[in-house]
Amino acid sequence: MKKNLCIVLILINPFVLSGQTAAKVNNVEDPAKIGSVTTGSIEKLAGVTIETIYKNCKEILDNTPGATDGVYNIDPDGSGAIEPFDCYCDMTTDGGGWTLVLLNNAGVAGCPRPYWDEVVNNVNLNGALSSDITTFDLFLGVSFWNIMGNQVRLDMGASPTSLSHRAYYDFSLDDGNNYALVMSNESVTIHTEGTSSPGMFTYHNGRQLTTRDADHDTYSGNCSNNYYESAWWYGACMSGSFWGGGLESYQDAPYWTGTAAEYFDYGSIWLK
Ligand SMILES: [Ca+2]
Ligand SMILES: [Ca+2]
């Protein structure tokens, strides 16, 4: 009897071991199945929503065909230390993918008046960011501009849908030279009145950025202090600042060129 039991145990054990081994091998040989089951389970258990945050409006549109104009969350440095923030994207004009980096509406009194550290690093707003770009002013931190694109579009006119001027350039900011403007290869596509080339190109190109507390202009004083503390690429001082003059000697409106004329109710700068 003892001998028979031994034989039975020996026969059963190899059968069980063989069965377990076979099942394990089958799962490992089907990695797609394991992957989908495991990932799905983790998502369901942890309640995690996997969401990709893109670095600019162009990247959003490339990955989301049919995206519409409006406010989107972007993260210029990806997994770096900079927190994602909201910006406005034009997804329809000239192929779309344009990130709004500077906006001034005369109907929104004044403008952002950032100090140097703010003009470099912050999303500087006058009013609240919204899907209606006639209700706020914006100066996006210049440390992000090169990440938004290397082509600039300048718009100016009575409103976003009634432009007097539109021009395009190859564009960058020289971050080793106080964010000096580097613009070339002009293309003017809308010019219904006044001067075709904007002062931003004819006078301010190549100049460094000046703020109320950081004087990099060629004037004896600080030009920002003369123009409502606005940050701009001043010389001595300006011919066509999108911030205009503020609330005193000059119009509180975006200027296409000059300091006396060619100012409008709406002016915006976009990068792609
Ligand atoms: Ca304004
Ligand atoms: Ca100066």
Image: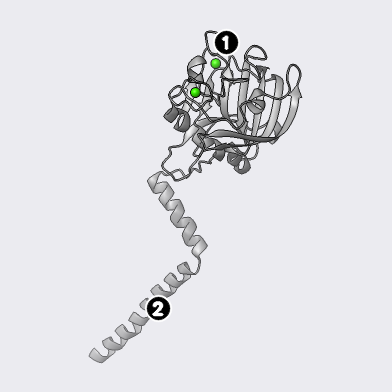
Relative placement, left or right, of 141 versus 189 is left
Q: From this viewpoint, which residue is outermost toward the bottom?
A: 3
Which residue is depicted at the point 73% across and 32% down? 187
Q: Position of residue 119 (x, y in %)?
A: 47, 28
- Name the secondary structure under disc 1: loop
Are discs 2 and 1 less than 8 Å apart at CB? no
Q: Which residue type carries mark 2?
A: Ser
Which residue is depicted at the point 26% across and 91% down? 3
Work out whether 84 lies above or below 22. above
Quadrant of res 151: top right
Confirm whether residue 167 shows in the render.
Answer: yes
Query: Marks 2 and 1, how far apart in space?
Result: 89 Å
Q: Which residue type carries mark 1?
A: Tyr
Confirm whether residue 128 shows in the render.
Answer: no
> Badge 1 local density, few (<14 within 10 Å), some, or many (20+)?
some
Q: Earlier in the sequence, mark 2 or mark 1?
A: 2
Q: From this viewpoint, which residue is outermost toward the front?
A: 220
In the rendered structure, find residue 56 and report the number of the disc placed on it.
none
Q: Mark 2, mark 1: which one is toward the viewer? A: 1
Give the position of the C terminus as an image quadrant: top right
Q: Position of residue 250 (x, y in %)?
A: 57, 10
Q: Position of residue 25 (x, y in %)?
A: 45, 72
- Name the secondary structure under disc 2: helix
Which residue is denoted by mark 1 in the rendering?
250
> Badge 2 local density, few (<14 within 10 Å), some, or many (20+)?
few
Q: Nearer the viewer, residue 91 or 105?
A: 105
Which residue is denoted by mark 2 in the rendering?
18
Q: Position of residue 194 (x, y in %)?
A: 74, 16
Quadrant of res 149: top right
Disc 1 within 8 angstroms of ligand 1 (CB): no
